[in-house]
Each structure stands twice: as structure tokens, then as C-alpha cells.
């Protein structure tokens, strides 16, 4: 019976590492390394000795790097990158069961997902292809978790076959892996408290973890610090993540990220631009944005609210 079940098991669909389409770089790089060794030999014969040693050291380093690159190219050939099988979707060190896959798709762009924290990605200069999966499981605030895995630079050309397997194993999933406010998982207790507060007081207050008021939503509009925008002038709300990279002597020393709630007004400034407020809305504010938005949408169904924040792990 066990043998029969094994034979009837659907085959995994695997996107694996592949050989590069061209190896021209090997000839160029190898020619340079060979020229360096010849130069070292000539210097050893004709002198001076220090020049022969210096060129030999450079040639040695070049040889090691050349060998390492060739080994890396051969090492990934045929090595599974991402797998769609009966047990779930596997990428790197993580596996997600099919009933937890809400959406799945490939995207190509100048970023690379971290192996140790697949919710985070880093910006790169060159484009890479990544698998992005949005889970049905939500974080503590109620936002569905999204993870990613960046494929090898050279991989097998069967991405469509892989996605077809995903749709077969998880037929309710789609390829719209972007997260939106409609995906929030509402906490009934928090939602009930906020609805009751609005009904009783006509206001909703957002505080930081120390209890200091940061935002106020009431019948008049939205107040952020000293600025207020009346509801009649609110065109849209959007959640975004700002990034700021600090540099010292031209070298990056770190990047900080700040979640913000962008409030776009129909009013315009002297330059003809829409007046916009960008107050911080940290993930530890109370209530979380994921629990506040459904209440606001219940109060003002026509209000446009988008969520473009990046995960910070």
C-alpha cells in the first residue's frame, strides 16, 4: 500500500539552478589570470624580485576568485530553488502549506529577499527574479504576512509550469500578491471597542505605546499634530514606508524605515499641489492601522485607503 501511494504521488515541480547561457566571461577572466602568471614569470627571470612577488600575489588572488566563480556556477546547476509539491510550497529553508497560500507569483526588479528573514528585502543595482507569497496567516496587527525568495541568477525556464502547479494545489489562490486593506484580519474585540467609542464619543484617538496622542479622527476631520484636514477635503489615505539611508564618506552606514499614514487633501498649495500630511504611524501605535481602517471604511465607505507599506520583519 505504501509503495502504491508513493507511486501515485504527484511529481514535484521544481525551479532549479541552471548553467549560464554563455561562458565568454571565463575566457576573458581566464586570459587575464594567465597573462598575470606569465607577467610574474617574466619578472622572476628579468627582475626585480619584488615585482614578481607582487604580480604573483595578484595572479593568485585572481585564480582563487576565478575558481570560486566557476565552482559556484557548477554547484547550482540542478539544485532545487523553489518547489511546488503535495506537501506545500518550499523555497530555501521555509515551507508553506497550501491552505495558507493566498497568492503567489514571480516578480523581477532591483531587490533581493533576505534568506534569514524572508519578509525583508534589500535594494540591488541589478534586477533579479523573486517568488513572492502572500499567506492567509496574519501578523499580530492583522496584516497578512508576505514572504519572498530570490531565485538564482540563472535558473530553469519553467516558471509558468511552477505557477500552474500552484493553482492546481491551491485553487483558491491567485497571482495578485500585493496586499490591500481588504486583506486585513479584523480582531472582533478591538473592532467592537472602536465602533463603540465612535458611537459614544464621535472620535477615535491613535496613541503611541506611551499613551501620547498622535492622531485624532472625529466628526470634523483628521488631526495630526497641529494640522487638521476636514473630511470634506480628504481625497484619500495611504499607508507607506519611508526609507532613509545615512552615509559617511560616501559609504552607507545603515538604513532606517518609518511607516507613515499619508493624508491627501483636495486643497492645493501655492504651487498647485495637493496639500498632504505624512504623520508617522508606527506598527506599535494603538489601535494598529489594520484595526482602524475597517472602522473608517464603515464610517466613510467611499473613502479610498491603500496600503503600500513594506514588511520590516
Image: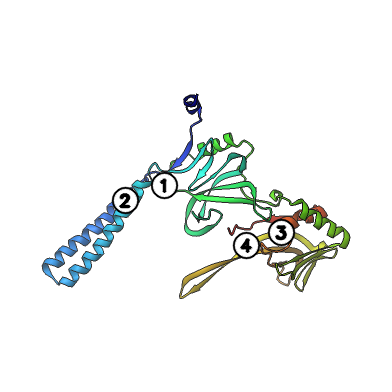
**Is 269 located above or below residue 178 in the figure?**
below
Image-based side of 5 in relation to 63, left or right: right
- Disc 3 to disc 4, how far (Cα)? 13 Å
Q: What element carries label 1?
A: loop
| Residue on which disc 4 sits | 241
Quadrant containing the C terminus in the rendered view: bottom right
| Residue on which disc 1 sits | 154
- Disc 4 to disc 1, how far (Cα)? 31 Å
Sooner in the amino-acid sequence: mark 2 or mark 3: 2
| Residue on which disc 2 sits | 70
Q: What element carries label 3?
A: helix
Sooner in the amino-acid sequence: mark 2 or mark 1: 2
* Residues at discs 2 and 4 in contact (Cβ within 8 Å): no
Residue 295 horizontal/vertical position (percent) = 79, 55
* Residues at discs 2 and 1 in contact (Cβ within 8 Å): no
Instruction: Identify the residue at horizontal 57%, vertical 41% (top origin).
Output: 97
Instruction: Identify the residue at horizontal 35%, vertical 50% (top origin).
Output: 72
Residue situated in front as seen by the camera: 96 or 290: 96
Residue 68 horizontal/vertical position (percent) = 32, 54
* Residues at discs 1 and 3 in contact (Cβ within 8 Å): no
Residue at the farthest front position: 1
- Disc 2 to disc 3, how far (Cα)? 49 Å
Sooner in the amino-acid sequence: mark 1 or mark 3: 1
- Coloring basis for residues: rainbow
Amino acid at each position: 500500500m505504501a509503495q502504491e501511494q508513493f507511486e501515485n504521488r504527484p511529481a514535484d515541480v521544481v525551479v532549479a539552478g541552471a548553467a549560464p547561457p554563455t561562458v565568454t566571461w571565463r575566457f576573458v577572466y581566464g586570459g587575464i589570470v594567465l597573462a598575470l602568471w606569465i607577467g610574474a614569470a617574466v619578472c622572476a627571470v628579468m627582475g626585480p624580485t619584488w615585482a614578481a612577488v607582487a604580480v604573483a600575489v595578484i595572479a593568485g588572488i585572481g585564480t582563487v576568485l576565478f575558481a570560486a566563480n566557476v565552482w559556484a556556477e557548477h554547484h547550482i546547476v540542478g539544485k532545487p530553488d523553489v518547489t511546488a509539491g503535495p506537501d506545500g510550497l518550499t523555497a530555501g529553508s521555509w515551507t508553506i502549506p497550501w491552505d495558507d497560500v493566498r497568492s503567489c507569483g514571480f516578480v523581477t526588479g532591483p531587490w533581493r529577499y533576505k534568506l534569514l528573514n524572508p519578509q525583508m528585502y534589500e535594494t540591488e543595482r541589478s534586477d533579479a527574479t523573486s517568488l513572492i507569497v502572500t499567506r492567509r496567516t496574519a501578523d499580530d496587527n492583522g496584516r497578512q504576512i508576505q514572504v519572498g525568495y530570490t531565485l538564482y541568477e540563472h535558473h530553469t525556464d519553467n516558471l509558468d509550469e511552477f505557477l500552474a502547479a500552484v493553482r492546481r494545489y491551491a485553487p483558491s489562490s491567485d497571482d495578485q500578491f500585493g496586499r490591500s486593506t481588504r486583506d486585513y484580519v479584523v480582531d472582533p474585540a478591538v473592532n467592537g471597542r472602536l465602533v463603540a467609542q465612535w458611537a459614544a464619543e464621535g472620535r477615535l484617538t491613535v496613541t503611541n505605546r506611551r499613551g501620547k496622542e498622535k492622531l485624532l479622527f472625529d466628526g470634523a476631520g483628521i488631526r495630526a499634530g497641529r494640522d487638521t484636514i476636514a473630511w470634506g477635503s480628504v481625497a484619500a489615505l495611504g499607508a507607506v514606508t519611508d526609507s532613509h539611508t545615512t552615509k559617511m564618506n560616501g559609504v552607507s552606514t545603515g538604513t532606517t524605515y518609518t511607516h507613515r499614514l499619508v493624508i491627501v487633501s483636495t486643497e492645493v498649495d501655492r504651487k498647485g499641489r495637493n496639500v498632504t500630511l505624512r504623520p508617522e504611524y508606527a506598527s506599535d501605535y494603538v489601535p494598529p492601522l489594520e484595526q482602524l481602517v475597517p472602522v473608517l471604511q464603515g464610517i466613510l465607505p467611499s473613502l479610498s485607503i491603500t496600503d503600500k507599506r513594506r514588511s520590516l520583519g
